[in-house]
């Protein structure tokens, strides 16, 4: 078995399994806990709408709080959107998803992904610089923060090494041929490392954010408090 | 030349040139081993571990935005005062003992077990440096209610016997005597007789039946007794059938502030039982922030079922009375700014009530920057005002409030929390500040439109 066959075969299967099962387990650890029973007379009863509103409202720092964290938030948007474009709008990646799921959509031009990559890398470097230099973030940070940063950047860097490779569009069920299988294998393995880490570290905030915001939204709405 | 010793900074603010002694930063109660303290803390914390708390403990991304929302961090610039850091030992315990991958964390010792020394170190962060004002909860991009987590962490600290001693002693006195400041039923009765006589108001006590049961804060009873007179005048003017009850009058709840759930429940049940006994349809809470949170939002849970009466904060009560035309006031001259008690406004959802009252007074309301739900805390809530070793820290936090008030340019300032008033009075004396915090209730009573009726 070549390295590429390993990356496309057992490594991908295992990493996807860990990703899905681990994330489900992490959510289950939250949902299996008892829910708070509240006998107080609610001021408002539209709590589900309040929970959903909280998910939306925490997307941006608010004026009432002097836009605390605005720089970090703008930067986070830069690399989150950058990564989203790379993953979901780059033709080879759509092909990869299509081979896995059968789902496909129209890709954006390659240059858009290149710009997005620049945003993602600059944003991630800025985020790390802030984490290393800001007293508060440095105190809060642990292995998870730095390793998560590493496994997020790694697929981008290994992917960039493939940019000069001639890309051969594949049919939905056949992977593209590549002149340098080792480079592609390393890229795939770096993605698989990220999938493996996802359930255990802070990457899981991608799903947890909806749970925490929603719960707070429900509780605050019940009290009639501002979200 | 030797370097300056930064461990013992010079105290330039003291009346005499002095060196700040390293403050004692940890108190403890009871004769327990360190292992027992940790065990009790962890058991208490796991008892509180519901699904929402678990979601919060799993979600922090360590962005640190909460620091900038905290008056203690902003005025100290000490990263340890970052709100989410204040619950770090409990996050650590969750990951190690109960989280989804606890077995992995323990097996590879990825998070060390929480030690008693760590809990002692965190005592200052959980008590001296947090008023549970909830400003941090509002800016967390993950939506974590950090203030609620601090409240739960305090339960654990109390169980471990690791509470600042002054706060513990005040809470213990409240539990034993029924009041944290010695406002026992006997003292209450004497005070009421004196106030009724001195100010010619009727203050009914222990009526067997009444539609409205009024509760007080011992700060009002002992330090701001004119609030009780104001209350009597407003209620008389509104024509209410009301009473105070000697078996349930103290609305402050130091069980909640210190972290003792049993005491919190007991103090709440005294009020609830008294209201049930006099068949009250409405229980009115005094000008006290945390009393509102304790009874309005947690009282029914202590009771184990919905309360058989309505609970209103005094500002909500007056707003309703004005809306219903039961109370009319003269137009207030000059401008006023309102300091929102965190537990009534941001944490309690009654932000609009005080403003409705001020609008009813025809007051020119000059809001402070970040008013209403985004208001900065006075620094004295959450029991912090009782902890003497926190005075310097608390007063530094109060300086934000002073700037806010000055920026409003208002002629007078009012609030609807006697604990906030206490904190303002202390700040005023400390900084020799020429502003005096007033009471919204007293402002209304002083401006009732029919003075003769009010004094009848």
Image (cartoon, coloured by chain):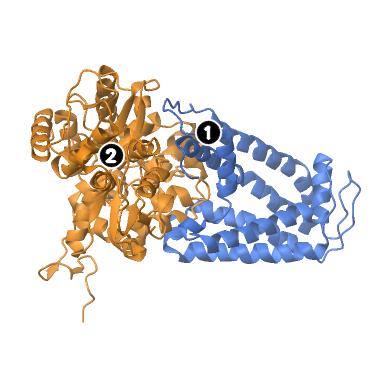
- Relative to B419, A204 lies left or right: right
The residue shown at (18%, 64%) is: B432
Identify the residue under disc 1.
Answer: A30
Placement of B311 over or under B400, stated as above or below? above
- Chain B, chosen colour in render: orange
Q: Can residue A203 be seen in this view?
A: no
Relative to A208, say whether B71 is above or below. below
Q: Residue B202: horizontal and vertical position, in percent?
A: 16, 32
- Which of the two discs, 1 and 2, sits closer to the camera? 2
- What subunit carries mark 1? A
Q: Work out how far the residue at label 1 is from the one at label 2, CA to CA, in angstroms.
A: 27 Å
Tell me what residue is drawn at x 24 percent, y 68 percent: B6
Which lettered chain is shown in blue? A
Q: Position of residue B425 (x, y in %)?
A: 20, 54
x and y, in percent, of residue A132 in the image: 48, 64
Residue at 56 percent across and 38 percent down: it is A51
Disc 2 designates what residue?
Answer: B257
């Amino acid at each position: 078995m070549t390295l590429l066959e390993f990356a496309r075969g057992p490594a991908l299967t295992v990493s996807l399994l860990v990703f899905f099962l681990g994330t489900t387990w992490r959510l289950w650890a939250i949902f299996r806990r008892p829910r708070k029973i509240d006998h107080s007379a609610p001021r408002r009863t539209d709590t589900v709408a309040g929970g959903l509103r909280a998910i939306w409202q925490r997307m941006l720092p608010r004026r009432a709080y002097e836009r605390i964290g605005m720089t970090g938030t703008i930067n986070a948007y830069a690399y989150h959107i950058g990564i989203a474009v790379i993953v979901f709008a780059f033709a080879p990646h759509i092909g990869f998803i299509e081979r896995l799921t059968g789902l496909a959509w129209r890709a954006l031009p390659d240059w858009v992904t290149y710009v997005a990559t620049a945003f993602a890398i600059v944003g991630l470097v800025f985020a790390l610089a802030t984490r290393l230099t800001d007293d508060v973030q440095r105190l809060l940070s642990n292995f998870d923060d730095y390793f998560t940063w590493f496994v997020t950047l790694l697929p981008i860097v290994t992917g960039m090494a493939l940019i000069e490779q001639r890309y051969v569009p594949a049919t939905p069920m056949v992977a593209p041929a590549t002149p340098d299988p080792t480079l592609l294998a390393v890229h795939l393995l770096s993605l698989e490392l990220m999938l493996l880490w996802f359930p255990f570290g802070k990457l899981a905030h991608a799903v947890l954010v909806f749970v925490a915001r929603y719960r707070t939204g429900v509780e605050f709405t019940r009290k009639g408090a501002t979200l | 030349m030797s370097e300056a010793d930064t461990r013992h900074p010079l105290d330039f603010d003291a009346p005499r040139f002095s060196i700040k002694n390293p403050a004692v930063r940890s108190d403890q109660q009871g004769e327990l081993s360190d292992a027992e303290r940790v065990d009790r803390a962890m058991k208490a914390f796991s008892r509180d571990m519901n699904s929402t708390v678990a979601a919060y403990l799993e979600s922090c991304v360590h962005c640190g935005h909460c620091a900038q929302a905290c008056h203690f961090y902003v005025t100290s610039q000490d990263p340890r005062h970052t709100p989410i850091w204040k619950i770090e030992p409990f996050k650590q315990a969750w990951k190690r003992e109960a989280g989804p991958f606890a077995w992995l964390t323990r097996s590879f010792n990825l998070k060390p077990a929480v030690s008693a020394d760590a809990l002692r170190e965190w005592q200052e962060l959980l008590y001296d440096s947090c008023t549970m004002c909830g400003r941090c909860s509002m800016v967390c991009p993950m939506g974590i209610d950090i203030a609620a987590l601090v409240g739960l962490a305090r339960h654990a600290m109390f169980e471990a016997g690791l509470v600042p001693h002054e706060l513990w002693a005040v809470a213990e006195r409240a539990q034993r005597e029924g009041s944290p400041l010695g406002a026992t039923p006997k003292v209450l009765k004497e005070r009421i007789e004196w106030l009724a006589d001195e100010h010619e108001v009727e203050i009914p006590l222990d009526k067997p039946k009444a539609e409205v049961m009024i509760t007080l804060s011992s700060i009002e009873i002992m330090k701001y007794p004119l609030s009780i007179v104001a209350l009597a005048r407003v209620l008389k003017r509104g024509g209410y059938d009301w009473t105070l009850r000697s078996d349930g009058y103290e609305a402050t709840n130091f069980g909640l502030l210190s972290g003792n759930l049993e005491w919190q429940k007991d103090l709440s049940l005294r009020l609830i039982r008294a209201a049930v006994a006099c068949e009250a349809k409405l229980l009115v809470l005094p000008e006290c922030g945390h009393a509102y949170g304790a009874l309005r939002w947690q009282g029914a849970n202590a009771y184990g079922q919905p309360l058989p009466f309505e609970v209103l904060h005094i500002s909500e009560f007056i707003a309703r009375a004005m809306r219903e035309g039961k109370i009319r006031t003269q137009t207030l001259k000059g401008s006023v700014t309102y300091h929102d008690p965190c537990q009534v406004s941001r944490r309690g959802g009654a932000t609009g009530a005080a403003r409705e009252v001020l609008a009813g007074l025809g007051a020119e309301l000059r809001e402070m920057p970040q008013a209403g739900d985004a208001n900065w805390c006075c620094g004295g809530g959450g029991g912090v005002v009782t902890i003497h070793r926190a005075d310097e820290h608390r007063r530094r936090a109060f300086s934000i409030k002073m700037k806010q008030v000055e920026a409003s340019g208002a002629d007078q300032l009012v609030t609807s929390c006697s604990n906030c008033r206490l904190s303002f009075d202390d700040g005023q004396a400390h900084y020799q500040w020429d502003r005096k915090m007033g009471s919204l209730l007293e402002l209304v009573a002083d401006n009732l439109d029919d003075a003769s009726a009010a004094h009848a």
